[in-house]
Amino acid sequence: MSAEFRLADVAVALMAIALLLWAGHGVRANVHFLRNLFLPVSVIAGTLGLLLGPQVFGPLLTRLTPWPGGPIPGVSYAVWSSLPGLLISVVFAALFLGKPLPGMREVWRSSGPQLFLGYAISLGQYASGLLLAMLVLTPFFGTDPLAGVLLEIAMTGGHGTAAGLGDTFEALGFAEGRDLALALATVGLVGGVLLGTLFVNIAMRRAPHALPAPLPIVLDEPGIAPAHPDGPASGQAGAVEALSLQIGLIGAAIVIGMLLQTLLVQAERLLWVQWSGPLMAYVPLFPLAMIGGVLLQLALTAMGRAHWVDDRLVGRLSGTALDFIIVSALATLSLSVIGDQLWPFILLAMTGLAWATFCLLVLAPRFIPQHWFARGVGDFGQGTGMVVSGLLLMRMADPEGRSGNLERFGYKQLLFEPVVGGGLLTAMALPLAAQFGSLTIFAWSAGLTLLTILGGLRLGRSLRSGGAPV
C-alpha cells in the first residue's frame, strides 16, 4: 500500500467497497435481467463504482449533489488501484488450505480427460492470442505484442488474476494491459455464461436421452452466504479465536510464498545465465503463496493438526478478498485505454470465445467418452470466465449430478490451478514473452497445445476401448 495514504483514507475506501457490494446486491435482486445472466454481485458493484467515478458520472454528481468530490472520494480510487495486488495473494494462499489432497494417481484416473481439455483451452488461448497479436494487432493497430498473452490471463485466470498482475504489466511497460485484461475477463464471463446456457439448451433438445431434464435453478439471494447451522467454527477456540487463527494460517502461507519468491530470485542470480535480463523478479507473489498454502496444509496434516484449518472460514475470507479485488479493479478500470484499443479488444474477445467453443464442441466429445457435454461444459465455463461459471453450467446441464462432473472437475483443479488459470505459467507468461519474444512463446504454446490435443485424443480412445476406468 502506498505510503501517502492515511489510515482514514484506507478505512473509507474499504467501507465504500462494502457499501457498493450492498448496492450491487440490491440491484441484482431487483433487476431480473442481471439475475438471469448470473453476474456475481462483485461485478455489478464494481461497475457501479466505475459509473460513480470521475470517468463517467462523477463530475455531474459533483455539481448536482453537496459532495465536493462526488459520492466516492477521489482518494478511495487511488487506494482501490493498490488493493488487487495485495489481496490476490490472500485468495491464492487459501486455495488449498483445508482441502483434502488426494494422490496424483486418483486425480489422474478420475479426471484425466478433463485435465487435457482444460489445458487445451488454456494453452490454445496463448497460441491463438499470440498469433493474432503478431499477424493483426501489432502490425495494423500498433498494439503491444504482450497483448497476445491476455486471453489466458483474463478468461481462464479471471478478474482476480488480471488485477493481481497489474504491477507486472506496469513493470514491463504495458500498464494498459491490466485494463484490457479486466475488460476481457468481463466479456468472457458474460459471453461464456450466455453461450454456455445456449449450448445447454441445444444439447437438451437434440439429445434429451443423454442429459437429464434441467431443473429450475433456485438461487439464494445473491451475495449473501447463509449462516452455518452449527454456529461459528470452533477451530482452536479455547486458545485462539477461530477467525484469527484462519487469518494467521493464511498469513503463514503468504510468508512461505515470500520466502520462496526470495529463494527464486537469489537462485536465478546465482545460477541463471542472464542473457537478456532477470525473469524471476517479475513473477508475482500470489502463485507462490498458493504453493505456500499447499506446503502448509501438508505440514499440518503430517503433524496431526489439519483440524486447525476451518475450510468454511478460510473460504469466506478468500471469497471476501476476491469480492474486494473485483470491485476495486473494475471501479478503477481505464475506459480511455479500452477506447484507444477498441478493435484489438473486440478481436481478442472473439478469438477467446471462439477457441473455447471449439474445444467444447469438437475436442470434448473426443476426449471424454461418457457424459462429455455435462463434464466439458464446466471447463468451457472456467476457460471463459471463472470456476464459478463452470460450476453453474455443469449444474444446468446435470442438475442431479449423475455424470459425476462436479467431483471430476474438482479433482482436475489440483493439477490445473497450480500451473494455469492464475498459476505459475499464467504469472510467468508476461515476463517470458517480454524476455524471449512473442514468436518463441507462440511456438512453445502451439507445440504444447498440439501435444495436449494428441494426448487427450489418445486417452479418449483408450477409455472407450476399456483400457482404463473413467
Image (spheres, helix red, strand yellow):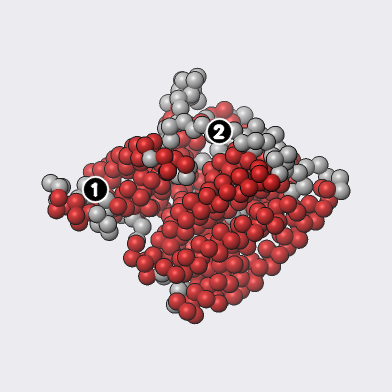
Q: Residue at x 48, y 63 (%)?
A: 282
Q: Residue at x 21, y 47 (%)?
A: 71
Residue 444, placed above or below residue 229? below
User: Which quadrant would the C terminus be assigned to in this image?
Assistant: top right
Instruction: Give amino acid for label 2.
Output: Pro
**Are circles 2 and 1 on residues that touch, CB within 8 Å?**
no
Q: Position of residue 141 (x, y in %)?
A: 45, 76
Q: CA distance from mark 2 to mark 1?
A: 39 Å
Crowd rating for badge 2 (residues with CA inside 10 Å; few <14, some 14–19, many 20+): few
Apparent side of residue 343 relative to residue 24 in the rendered image (left or right): right
Q: Which residue is mark 1?
A: 72
Give SS at disc 1.
Answer: loop
Which residue appears farthest toward the bottom when viewing the image? 139
Q: Residue at x 61, y 74 (%)?
A: 440
Is 410 in front, or is 282?
410
Instruction: Give amino acid for label 1.
Output: Ile
Q: Nearer the viewer, mark 2 or mark 1?
A: 2
Q: Residue at x 14, y 53 (%)?
A: 63
Q: Position of residue 105 (x, y in %)?
A: 75, 43
Q: Which residue is mark 2?
A: 216
Give SS at disc 2.
Answer: loop
Apparent side of residue 143 relative to residue 267 in the rendered image (left or right): left
Q: Position of residue 184 (x, y in %)?
A: 47, 59
